[in-house]
Amino acid sequence: MTLLVLRDANQPVKQVQVSKPLVVAVPLIALLSISGLIVSLQIQSNRTVNNLESMLQAQQLRFEATVTDKDAAIERLQNEVIALSGQSRDMMDRMERMAELETELQKFIDKYGSESSGSQESGKLSSLSMDNNSWYASDGVGGEFIAVHETEIEQLAEDTREQFTEMSKLLDEMEQNMPATLQIAEQTQIKLAGTPTEWPTLSQRITSNFGYRSDPFSGRAAFHAGIDIAGKTGDPIYAAGAGKVVTVASDSSHGKYIVIEHPEGLESWYLHLSKITVSVGDEVSKGQQIGKLGNTGRSTGPHLHFEILKKGKTIDPLPYLKSNDG
């Protein structure tokens, strides 16, 4: 085949001899190239679409997992807040009981303490004001399911925070007041144990009272500084109150005798003993045996002469002993 190549108008026509197979092959090759390019683009497009779908599926799975984790976290948070609220109520109850205990302790101090014990300086804790019941059963649960909304959870959390704030204030107040209260209670306990109110003998039969009387030896008027309590020789003699033994001695007037020092400037004296079982410096407890009843010294028969001195002055011991009757 002959191809005519036309150039500019002033140029001659150029003839080119081309074989017939070549003329057929060139368009075919071009067509195949275009087809191959189209197929390649189609494959690339499919791959892109598949990749996008895979990415979207993975993103969807991650999103669903995130939502699931968030829901689970919210549920855990709700359960924790509800549990915390229950603990808060229980703690409030315990704090209220402790406050009541402190109040009872203060009443004890007020009843048995002296005016100088400083009980007024220790503040009383008032009971907490609570809108709900003061106790919560731990056994037996039930009832219909009522979903808890987020707003309710938020309110519950706020209420719990307020309760813990109240408990914190109460604990601060208790930490401030309780040591002083316990110290006063301890002092009151020491005073009670040390006050000579325990009967010093088995017998409570009094043969001579405190005050003026006719002296059994001279028959003249005389002052009796204690009380005489009848008994048998060898009967146990007990400390009327806790204290320290400051005197163990014997003379012609007192016979064998003991002096015990107690709180608040009090002393108790035990005269005419047949035996002494304590020594000077001993710390004795209320009701502890310290000797045995006798008839030593200026005595007409077996008995205990019992005295109480307050700040060095003899006083009637009977009111102290009567306070422990019954």
Image (cartoon, grey):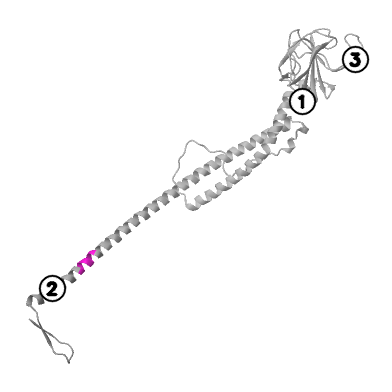
Which residues lie in the magenta part?
37-43
- SS of the residue under disc 1: helix
Q: Earlier in the sequence, mark 2 or mark 3?
A: 2
Query: Which mark is drawn over residue 222?
Result: 3
Crowding at mark 3 (Cα within 10 Å: few <14, some 14-19, many 20+): few
Secondary structure mainly formed by the magenta segment: helix
Confirm whether the magenta stretch covers residue 38: yes
Which three-letter amino acid code belongs to the residue tagged 1? Pro
- The residue sitting at the bottom extreme is 10
Of residues 48 and 83, the one nearer the viewer is 48
Image quarter in which the N terminus is found: bottom left
**Looking at the image, residue 6 lies above or below residue 192:** below
Q: What residue does disc 1 label?
A: 263
> Closer to the observer: label 2 or label 1?
2
Measure the C-alpha gap from mark 3 to mark 1. Answer: 30 Å
Which three-letter amino acid code belongs to the residue tagged 2? Leu
Q: Residue at x 61, y 45 (%)?
A: 166
Q: Residue at x 64, y 38 (%)?
A: 99
Image position, residue 259 (x, y; %): 79, 17
